[in-house]
Amino acid sequence: MSRKIRTLTLKSKEEQELIDHRDHDPRPYIQRIRTKLGADESLRAVLNADNPRDAKVYKFNQVLDRLLLEFVHTKLDLYKKLTEPKVNEMLKRQWFEVLASGMSDEGAVHGR
């Protein structure tokens, strides 16, 4: 991937991840969810209290489902932003120019 594409000024971390994760590796996202899960105070309180295992599992499942839903909403919000007509047009124009100029530069270097 061209360095020019990576150095585009982007407005959010999620937009940068779209470029950086060419293979769409889910591990960074899973790790973030796992970190949030471990930091959830309500889950810690239930797990550390004298509760039956079923209650602990139930609370764990609730928190994990909430975090997964937050993840989906975050990605959906990004998708909605990037597909708004004006934003989408600007994004496509800017990225095309960067990619096309990068390929033109590579073609000149390789004698094409």
Image: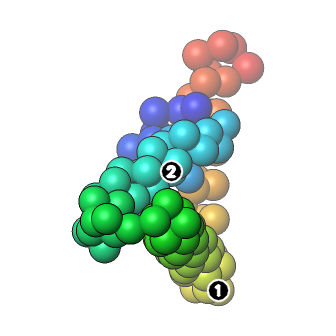
Identity of the residue drawn at 66% across and 37% down: 23
> As rendered, which of 75 and 3 lies closer to the eye?
75
Identity of the residue drawn at 45% across and 56% down: 33
Residue 103 rendering spot, x and y as whole percentages: 64, 34
Please, what is the three-letter code of the amino acid marked with disc 1? Pro
- For mark 1, give the secondary structure: helix
Q: For this view, does 6 lie left or right of residue 85?
A: left
The N terminus - image quarter = top right
> As rendered, which of 112 and 3 lies closer to the eye?
3
Please, what is the three-letter code of the amino acid marked with disc 2? Tyr
The C terminus - image quarter = top right
Q: Quadrant of residue 89?
A: bottom right
Identity of the residue drawn at 43% across and 50% down: 34
The crowd level at tag 1 (other Cα within 10 Å; few <14, some 14-19, many 20+) is few
Residue 10 rendering spot, x and y as whole percentages: 40, 60
Q: Is residue 98 above or below residue 81?
A: above
Location of mark 2 (residue): 29
Q: Are marks 1 and 2 in contact (CB under 8 Å)?
A: no
Q: Which of the two labelled residues, at mark 1 and mark 2, occupies the earlier sequence position?
A: 2
